[in-house]
Amino acid sequence: MTLLNTTFHVHKSVDALFIKWVKEIYLPVAMDSGLFKNPLFTRIMTQVDPEATSYAVQLQASSHRDAEAWHDSTSAQLKDALAREVGERILHFTTYMEIMS
């Protein structure tokens, strides 16, 4: 089992827009793909920038291949569309993790 974790660093000027995007677009599209279960959307409590908040979106996939394929296609398209709207006020990186238990 693979955990697809994407961490977002969001400037406070687009915070509400980002939360709405995750809840109304990103997570529904991910879940509708049928590749994921147990979605988790979290706010990272450690604040390194007073002008921004960090969030993590985690999705469990049965295989690394499925997670990577979705990330490289659909997820990339969704994040590119968001970036066209907000520019560099949202930064992100993705980590694939093996679920051990």
Image (cartoon, grey):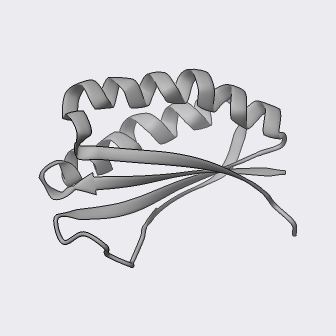
Q: Residue at x 50, y 36 (%)?
A: 28
Q: Residue at x 29, y 64 (%)?
A: 53
Q: Residue at x 30, y 30 (%)?
A: 83
Q: Quadrant of the C terminus?
A: bottom right
Of 50 and 39, the residue lying toward us: 50
The answer to which quarter of the image holds residue 35 is top right
Q: Residue at x 48, y 58 (%)?
A: 56
Residue farthest bottom in this picture? 46
Residue 63 screen position, x and y as percent: 84, 40
Is residue 63 shown left or right of residue 38?
right
The answer to which quarter of the image holds residue 61 is top right
Of 94 and 36, the residue lying toward us: 94
Residue 99 screen position, x and y as percent: 81, 61
The answer to which quarter of the image holds residue 87 is top left
Is residue 51 shown left or right of residue 92?
left
Residue 49 screen position, x and y as percent: 24, 69
Of 49 and 77, the residue lying toward us: 49
In the displayed structure, would residue 23 be above or below residue 75?
below
Is residue 38 shown left or right of residue 42?
right
Total tally of numbered discs in the picture: 0
In the displayed structure, would residue 14 be above or below residue 44?
above
Residue farthest left in this picture? 13
Of 42 and 89, the residue lying toward us: 89
In the displayed structure, would residue 45 be above or below residue 92?
below
